[in-house]
Amino acid sequence: MKTLFENALLQLKRAVAVQSFDPAFIVRLSFPHREIRGHIPLLRDDGTLQMVEYYRVQHNNWRGPYKGGIRFHEQTDIEEVKALAFWMTLKCAVADLPMGGGKGGATINPKEFSSGELERLSRAWMRALVDVVGPDKDVPAPDVNTTPQIMAWMADEYATITGDRSGAVITGKPVEHGGSLGRDRATARGGFEVFEALRESLELPQRCRLVIQGFGNAGEHAAEFFFHAGHQIVGVSDSKGAVVNPDGFDIAALSAHKHQTGSVAGFAGGKDFVGSILEVENEVLVPAALENQITKENVSRLKTKIILELANGPTTPEADDELFVAGVPVIPDILANSGGVTVSAYEWEQNKKGEHWSEADVVEKLKKTIQIQAQAIFERSQILKTDLRRAAFVIALERLEQASPF
Ligand code: NAD
């Protein structure tokens, strides 16, 4: 099986097959500027010592400081972080932000850690990287299993060491610690706005049935936005189980159940589902969990009209090829989930200028940006007679080529 980074490079290869670029420029983009990995000695509550592997990959900074989240997950490794950093470079270019691409992580299952252990780990992560991050160097953010509280600990550790209390070193902080209003829902809102911008062009009905894989920051908030716009959420899953209801869920009740019990499974407003939630019939399939979910093995069993990628890298290049032939559009991650990094960039800008923007201003600005980029990518896909991912890559590559110092 290919690594995630190999898949990311295959996507790049697919894109340059529909529009040519200077080969030397493409080679440069195929290598991260810097890969950092090491081990944090973490003292567990029971007195034992655990050596935790941590990472930061700084992929590219031609357009601005490296930018990208930190993932705490037991399967995170350097190849995954490299791919995620590469996608951040492309995503920031798609969103036309003055930022480059980076990503970080640590190989742990945070659910096995107490709050004190997580705080010690988060502060140690920042201490290990304090020389290479900073408001004008590299600006991390949350990703899978990292929370606003974790960002606040990291920001505080950075401020304690450097004296810089602007908060601009890291985004996704709690609002009372310099976070931006609207950041918590920004990824989902962006996904919904992309869908709205492209719904008619993609010939989708006004009322769609959605299946959402993953019910965390991205998936749960997406369910809320789509539900309130009149769509039906007919299937959801998380790491512990799945639930379906062909008539659509009451999302507030489903969220309450998830927060009380820790899973969507067992929700009385639906039926527990055994099997792959991705194969439940719908009009809009939303992978919002982890990568490599839609592959050449299961792609022929999907019963959907479009895929809206809130997760990073959920579709493999082989599955992309089959979906393109089958006429199922994939709204690619670097567009569909770009709302998160866009509002992160707004947070960074507010911290740097010492400003506080209203939620209405943040939402309005995000909506406008998403509409412009979604339309541009759709039009380019028509011109190039290609899929939305290749079109998004081509637009990002053009912007990166302009910023390239070579
Ligand atoms: P999260 O930790 O808040 O939620 C992840 C969800 O996925 C949880 O509900 C978890 O139970 C579920 N999950 C894990 N394994 C699963 C499996 N095998 N089957 C079904 N569900 C599973 O993480 P998040 O921030 O929502 O991130 C989800 C995806 O969205 C990731 O790919 C992330 O990189 C991407 N993303 C997130 C943001 C953001 O702002 N949070 C921004 C851009 C992209």
Image: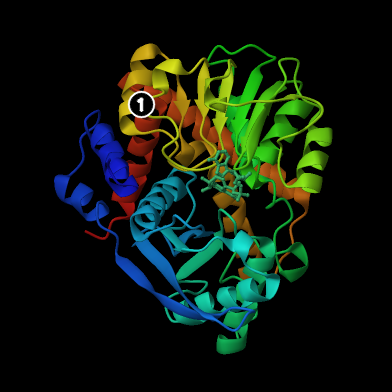
Between residue 13 and residue 212, name the one nearer to us.
Answer: 212
Asked if residue 280 is positioned above or below residue 71 in the image, the reply reads: above
- Where does residue 297 sit, x and y in percent of width and height? 36, 25
Q: Residue at x 55, y 55 (%)?
A: 143
Colouring mode (rainbow / by chain / secondary structure / one colour): rainbow
Task: Look at the image and tell me in which quarter the N terminus lies.
Answer: top left
Residue that badge 1 annotates:
319
Rendering quarter of residue 366: top right
Q: Residue at x 65, y 40 (%)?
A: 215
Q: Is residue 166 visible?
A: no
What amino acid is at disc 1?
Ala
Asked if residue 186 is positioned above or below residue 328 in the image, the reply reads: below
Rendering quarter of residue 220: top right
- Where does residue 82 sit, x and y in percent of width and height? 35, 56
Between residue 244 and residue 124, name the one nearer to us.
Answer: 244
> Is residue 390 left or right of 136 when viewed as pictured?
left
Mark 1 residue crowding within 10 angstroms, few (<14) / some (14–19) / many (20+): many
Ligand 1 quadrant? top right
Q: Residue furthest left?
A: 23
- Where does residue 14 sit, x and y in percent of width and height? 26, 32
- Where does residue 23 sit, x and y in percent of width and height? 15, 45
Task: Look at the image and tell me in which quarter the C terminus lies.
Answer: bottom left
Q: Is residue 154 visible?
A: yes
Q: Residue at x 82, y 29 (%)?
A: 268
Q: Residue at x 27, y 45 (%)?
A: 6
Counting labels gives: 1
